[in-house]
Amino acid sequence: MADHIATGQQLANKAEKKLFCCCALFGSNYEDAAELFLKSAKSFKLGKSWDKAGSIFIKSAKCHMKLDNKFDAAKAYVDASHCYKKTSRKAVTIFMEIGQHIMAAKYCKEIGDLYELDQDFEQAKSYYEKAAELFDIRGDSATSVIQCKQKVAQFSAQLQQYQKAIKIYEDTAQQSLNNNLLKYGVRGYLLNSGLCELCRGDIVAITNTLERYQDLDPTFSRTREYRFLADLAASIDNEDVASFTRVVKEFGSITHLESWKSTLLSRVKDALEAKVMEEDDLT
């Protein structure tokens, strides 16, 4: 292992020299530096020096970005994330063994973020669930626990585990209503839950859900989020794809829709279009 680490360091030093050795005609040699950094990172991997390998992969990625070689840059960033996952997992185990649950929770979040970057939502969900559990064990702030649970709900929704996501969002909304520091987020939790309910495709259930939300928080019916969900439900009930599209566009022009929410809305729209086409074929 020591030999691999030594080789990795030698290659990294050569890459740094290539990177900063400029001449009047050619400038920095990013292509050679990128290749040397890549070889260096692989050597560090063989030496199981995961943190170092991760940092060198990132240097290789940055060189590729300078060359506008986005494909190889993306691959290098993914390689870096895999290395960091190795070291973070080990850190979680050690911190748990010595009773440092808050540090273990923070590393669980870090691993979850890396899996999210890889779009491995199942693993990301698993690590965020563990982070929420660890924060809760130590009686850490409700905000930390809620933030982790919201990520679990988001990943559940992306994995089409809508009932699990709905329960988390509704439970969080209920818990936040009587907390002055947290109640500002209630409308967002209910919006997210409502979008998951729309994905389930039962218009009666959607209507009942909106009524329950009004009972839960009487102020919700006066929000843009409530009107958005109600208008979407009406579009689905009327089988009006154009109306559905318009409602989403109008809401999105004022309130930013994160990509995962846009994904949910696309699923609902696709299901609505399929239903309309099926009924058109029958007539």
Image: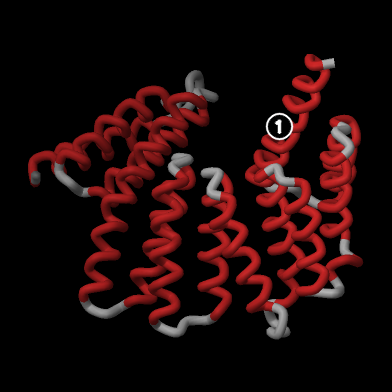
Picture layout, residue 279 above or below residue 198: above
Residue type at mark 1 is Ala
Residue 182, position in %: x, y? 68, 77
Q: Position of residue 140 (x, y in %)?
A: 47, 81
- 199 displayed left or right of 144: right
Residue 197 is left or right of residue 253, and the answer is left
Q: Is residue 201 visible?
A: yes
Badge count: 1
What's the image's color scheme? secondary structure
Q: Residue at x 72, y 55 (%)?
A: 194
The x and y percentages for residue 209 are 75, 60
163 relative position to 201: left or right: left
The picture places residue 112, in percent across and down from the top left corner, at 43, 54
Residue holding disc 1:
271
Work out which quarter of the rendered image holds the C terminus and state it.
Answer: top right
Q: Quadrant of residue 146?
A: bottom right
- Residue 5, relative to residue 71: is it above or below? below
Q: Residues within 10 Å of mark 1 (few under 14, many from 20)?
A: some
User: What residue is rendered at 87% in x and 64% in y?
Assistant: 223
State which quarter of the image contains the N terminus. Answer: top left
Would you place residue 113 above or below residue 75 in this image?
below
Q: Nearer the viewer, residue 207 or 59?
A: 207
Where 84 falls versus 277 (above or below)?
below
Which residue occupies the extreme front position in the image? 283
| Residue 249 seen from this side | no
Foreground residue among 23 and 207: 207
- Dot 1 falls on a residue whose secondary structure is helix
- Which residue is at a point 68% across and 47% down the rendered structure image? 258
- Residue at image point 42% right, 67% down: 131
